């Protein structure tokens, strides 16, 4: 059974039968909420029979998409829930692969099931990157030690094209 799940067992309808479960209860319905070995004795005027079974609990799968992410324009982010285990996947959009490529900000979630039918879920928020940068309006490469270099400040600047003009508007 999956951890946290209860199992209810209903015996077949036997007329004039007496039931006795391993915990001493005498009903035709028995609820299991923990792992262990269980047995049932059923007795009627023809005799009795005993059957037993064991119950193990399985921890639910725990997918991990990581922390929240940032996505900038023209980027693709790969969300991967694969954990090396034989899980079944279902993403918020219905896709069933272990990973999902996203190119738009939003909240993305994945549900996973293991071979026992136990269930886990994770989600991640993908935010739009706030691309900020600063470009100085002037610099003076005159070897006085002030504003010698022209530099653009910012993050995620992969490519930059700059034209520099002198004070008379000449390139």
Image (cartoon, rainbow, N blue to C red):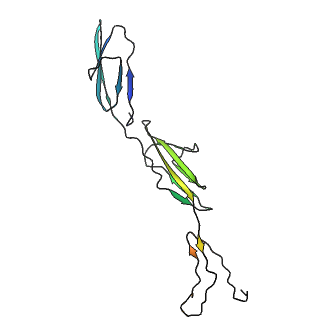
Nearer to us in this view, 97 or 142? 142
Please tell me which residue is depicted at 38% across the width and 28% down the height of the picture. Answer: 7
Quarter that holds the C terminus: bottom right
Q: Is residue 167 left or right of residue 133?
A: right
Provide residue 9's location: percent of width, then percent of height: 38, 23
Q: What residue is drawn where x is 33% and y is 34%?
A: 56
Q: How many marks?
A: 0
Image position, residue 164 (x, y; %): 67, 83
Quadrant containing the N terminus in the rendered view: top left
Q: Position of residue 100 (x, y in %)?
A: 55, 51
As drawn, is 134 to the left or to the right of 4? right
Figure check: 45 above or below 157: above
Residue plotted at (59% across, 72% down)? 133
- Where does the image place residue 162, in percent across and percent down from the top left? 66, 79
Q: Relative to residue 166, is residue 2 drawn left or right? A: left
Can you tell which quarter of the image residue 72 is in? bottom right
Please name the residue shown 70% across and 88% down the image: 167
């Amino acid at each position: 059974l999956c951890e946290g799940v209860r199992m209810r067992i209903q015996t077949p309808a036997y007329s004039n039968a007496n039931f006795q479960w391993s915990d001493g209860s005498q009903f035709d319905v028995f609820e299991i909420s923990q792992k262990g070995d269980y047995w049932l004795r059923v007795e009627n005027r023809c005799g009795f029979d005993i059957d037993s079974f064991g119950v193990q609990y399985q921890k639910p799968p725990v997918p991990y998409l990581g922390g929240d992410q940032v996505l900038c324009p023209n980027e693709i982010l790969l969300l991967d829930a694969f954990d090396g285990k034989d899980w079944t996947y279902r993403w918020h959009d219905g896709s069933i692969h272990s990973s999902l490529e996203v190119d738009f900000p939003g909240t993305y979630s994945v549900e996973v099931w293991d071979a026992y039918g136990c269930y886990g879920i994770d989600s991640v928020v993908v935010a739009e990157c706030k691309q900020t940068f600063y470009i100085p309006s002037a610099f003076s490469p005159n070897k006085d030690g002030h504003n010698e270099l022209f530099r653009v400040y910012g993050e995620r600047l992969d490519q930059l094209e700059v034209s520099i003009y002198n004070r008379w508007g000449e390139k």
